[in-house]
Image (tube, coloured by chain):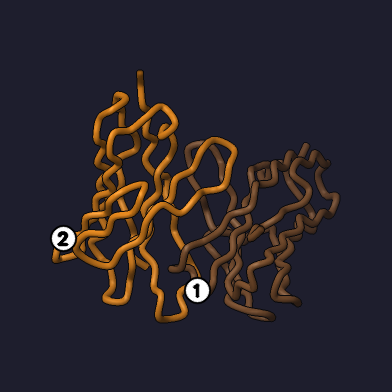
Chain colours: A brown, B orange
Amino acid sequence: EAQVTQNPRYLITVTGKKLTVTCSQNMNHEYMSWYRQDPGLGLRQIYYSMNVEVTDKGDVPEGYKVSRKEKRNFPLILESPSPNQTSLYFCASSLSQGGYEQYFGPGTRLTVT
Amino acid sequence: LAKTTQPISMDSYEGQEVNITCSHNNIATNDYITWYQQFPSQGPRFIIQGYKTKVTNEVASLFIPADRKSSTLSLPRVSLSDTAVYYCLVGDLTGSQGNLIFGKGTKLSVKP
């Protein structure tokens, strides 16, 4: 089954404790992206990757890092999480650049206390 | 990047046709228009995509006028399960555009 998976689905952590949210797709897609969703603000893009070893900032990259060492994986790293990063995070992938149909993962709900 | 503008919310009743309009005045020549649907706590799901005139699939229709500065998503005979947030995006399929702006979307509430 074609899908995008994220782990963990739920995470409660404390300020400053480094964490990684994994994202994996099995569709051989070139493009992958991370979004955060907050009440009243809609979906905002954090980082995206056009292909392996190619990443770029979205609209809200501060406080996040990403890497794309393999085509299927695109982890999101929070080196020193803060409470304002409490949010619902979605990973997505598409065949090529962002204009193509994007497939979204189930989401990761992160709480930073 | 072409910015899009949509109504914040809309109300409808079951069985009615719903039309959601999106404004994208600065759309570029290579941009396509894509609509997504999102239910609470789920990732958005692709509904329909088009470049010009009219596109129809089993779920919706997309109307795009000749100047392409706006588009209208049409949902025929909505049901309670169509209650969701609908996002309009413009994006390039031929270049190297990776930055996407989803915006706040339109929250559609369908009542019995």
Do circles 2 and 1 both sit on a common chain? no
Which mark is drawn over residue A24? none
Residue A20, position as x, y percentages in the image: 79, 57
Name the residue: 70% across, 66% down: A74
B33 vs B25, nearest the viewer: B33
Mark 1 falls within which chain?
Answer: A
What amino acid is found at the position of numbered circle 1 in the picture? Gln
Q: Which residue is mark 1?
A: A97
Task: Give the position of the N terminus of chain B as an image quadrant.
Answer: bottom left
Name the residue: 70% across, 46% down: A108
What amino acid is found at the position of numbered circle 2 in the picture? Pro
Residue A32, position as x, y percentages in the image: 61, 67
Work out whether B109 lies above or below B60: above
Task: Give the position of the C terminus of chain B as an image quadrant.
Answer: top left
Name the residue: 72% across, 62% down: A24
The kind of secondary structure element at disc 1 is loop
Work out whether B65 lies above or below B96: above
Q: Which residue is mark 2?
A: B65
Work out whether B6 lies above or below A25: above
* Labels in figure, total: 2
The residue at the far left in this view is B66
Mark 2 falls within which chain?
Answer: B
Q: Residues within 10 Å of mark 2 (few under 14, many from 20)?
A: few
Name the residue: 74% across, 44% down: A9
Work out whether A20 lies above or below B110: below
Is A21 situated left or right of B65 in this image?
A: right
Is B13 situated left or right of A17 in this image?
A: left
Residue B97, position as x, y percentages in the image: 45, 74
The residue at the far top in this view is B112
Q: Residues within 10 Å of mark 1 (few under 14, many from 20)?
A: many
The kind of secondary structure element at disc 2 is loop
- Disc 2/disc 1 C-alpha distance (Å): 25 Å
